[in-house]
């Protein structure tokens, strides 16, 4: 007896895995100190990327003091823009200047939307000018991972690792596009 994969479930597998992670994160809330530490590390990475783009920092500096709340339930985070155009984690504020939340509430549906159409599955509320700047950042700011790797490993290994990563991402993107929408009745 051969074990043949069910084609109707094959396209849902990566997405159902994301739903599983989201359900697990909802049930197993980390302690508040760990959550804050993860948020701080993500903001450090974002600031590292922003510091490589002077124009991005200038654009954000115009909105110094404004807050952005991100709701990717169960992950909630609030940042404030500093006077130099970087981000700082803060406790939730009563009324953020900009609120970004998933339309569907599902990480899997949001990931599918992004992979297929490069469109974000989010609702945006609040300061229109700040929302426009965040949109500009999304379109124009990129992390040059290869450059960062080269600082640590040297040019040769960084180029090799980046090439492999690009091929993996291209293959994953092609796989997802071939899968098409999830069949009816299959959790996406």
Image (spheres, helix red, strand yellow):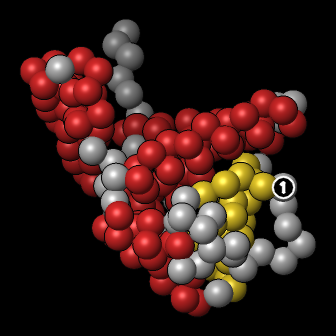
The correct choice, above or below, for 158 with respect to 78 in the image is: above
Residue 86: x percent and y percent?
Answer: 55, 59
Q: Locate residue 116 relative to residue 46 in the image: left or right.
A: left
Q: Residue furthest top?
A: 1
Q: Residue furthest left?
A: 156
The correct choice, above or below, for 122 with respect to 11 in the image is: below
**Image quadrant assignment for residue 149:** top left
Residue 145: x percent and y percent?
Answer: 29, 38
* Residue beneath disc 1: 91
Is residue 16 visible in the rendered structure shown here? no
Residue 105: x percent and y percent?
Answer: 68, 61
Residue 82: x percent and y percent?
Answer: 63, 64
- In what quadrant of the picture does the N terminus appear? top left
Q: Locate residue 73 relative to residue 157 in the image: left or right.
A: right
Is residue 23 visible in the rendered structure shown here? yes
Q: Give me the residue at 50% from left, 50% from top.
A: 47
As rendered, which of 152 and 74 lies closer to the eye?
152
Q: Residue furthest front?
A: 84
**Image quadrant assignment for residue 153:** top left
How many numbered circles does the render carry?
Answer: 1
As rendered, which of 126 and 49 lies closer to the eye?
49
Q: Give me the residue at 70% from left, 73% from top.
A: 65
Q: Locate residue 14 relative to residue 185 in the image: left or right.
A: left
As rendered, which of 115 and 154 lies closer to the eye?
154
Q: Give me the residue at 42% from left, 61% from top.
A: 114
**Image quadrant assignment for residue 123:** bottom right
Q: Give me the residue at 77% from left, 37% from top.
A: 35
Asked which secondary structure carries label 1, the reply is loop
Pointer 1 local density, CA inside 10 Å: few below 14, some 14–19, many at least 20: few
């Amino acid at each position: 007896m051969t074990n043949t994969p069910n084609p109707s479930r094959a396209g849902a597998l990566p997405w159902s895995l994301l739903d599983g992670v989201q359900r697990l994160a909802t049930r197993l809330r980390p302690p508040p100190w760990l959550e804050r530490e993860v948020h701080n590390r993500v903001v450090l990475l974002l600031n590292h990327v922003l510091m490589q783009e002077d124009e991005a920092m200038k654009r954000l500096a115009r909105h110094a003091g404004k807050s952005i709340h991100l709701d990717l339930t169960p992950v909630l985070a609030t940042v404030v823009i500093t006077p130099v155009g970087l981000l700082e984690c803060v406790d939730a504020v009563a009324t953020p200047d900009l609120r970004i939340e998933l339309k569907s509430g599902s990480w899997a549906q949001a990931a599918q939307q992004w992979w297929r159409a490069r469109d974000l599955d989010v609702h945006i509320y609040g300061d229109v000018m700040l929302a426009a700047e965040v949109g500009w950042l999304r379109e124009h700011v990129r992390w040059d991972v290869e450059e960062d790797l080269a600082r640590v490993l040297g040019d040769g290994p960084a180029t090799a690792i980046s090439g492999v990563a690009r091929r993996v991402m291209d293959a994953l993107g092609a796989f997802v596009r071939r899968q098409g929408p999830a069949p009816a009745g299959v959790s996406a």
